[in-house]
Image (cartoon, helix red, strand yellow):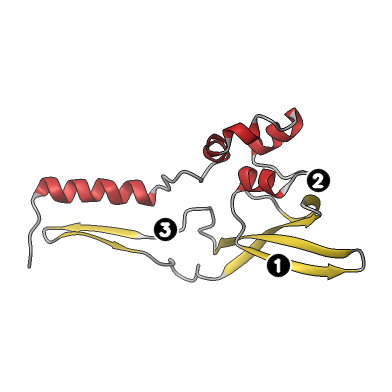
Amino acid sequence: MIKLPTSLALSALLAVAALLSGCTTSTTPMNRIDANRAEYETWPLDVKQAVLDGRVEKGMTSKQVEVAIGEPTGKELRETRQGSREVWTYKTKGSAGGSNPLKGSTVSVGTWGVGVQSGPLGNNDAYVETFEVVFENDRVVDTNGSQAK
């Protein structure tokens, strides 16, 4: 068995804790706005406010939706009598929910070092559909479900 010095184990633990806390550049509307600042500044005031609030409104473009609520879990084309519509689906994982893919992970620290085990807690591995955004000609024409924040 390899023993890590205490300072190395502590550093590894802090790095893992930062990862597990969801410290990524796209977890909040503000982070996504900052990453797309130049384009965001050209949008109308009501759209900017909706994006800042993490809301989707009819008439928004796919880029505005992406900045407001992030990347969808899935995208599909649906044929209707009116033509083709693109549907973005946002799903949360079990009751853990949220946008942190490592939620439900376990960090273990012992004399042997630091370990991370990622996976569902209990029966939280089933996806539950929560929200759909329907686009026609790159504009939101409808939403279905609840906009979870």
User: What residue is drawn where x is 7% and y is 64%?
Assistant: 2
Q: Is residue 73 left or right of residue 118?
A: right
Measuring from the top left, give residue 131's x and y in whole percent. Answer: 69, 57
Which numbered disc flags the more N-terminal residue, 1 or 3?
1
The amino acid beneath tag 2 is Lys
Q: Residue 7 location, x and y as percent?
A: 12, 45
Q: Residue at x 54, y 61 (%)?
A: 95
Q: Amino acid at mark 3?
A: Leu
Residue marked by disc 1: 76
Q: Badge 1 local density, few (<14 within 10 Å), some, or many (20+)?
A: few
Quarter-wise, where is residue 83 in the image?
A: bottom right
Residue corresponding to mark 2:
58
> For the residue labelled by badge 2, is the local secondary structure a helix, a strand or a loop?
loop
Q: Nearer the viewer, mark 1 or mark 3?
A: 1
Which element is circle 1 on? strand
Q: Nearer the viewer, mark 2 or mark 3?
A: 2
Query: Label for residue 102?
Result: 3
> Alpha-carbon neighbours of circle 3 within 10 Å: few (<14), some, or many (≥20)?
some
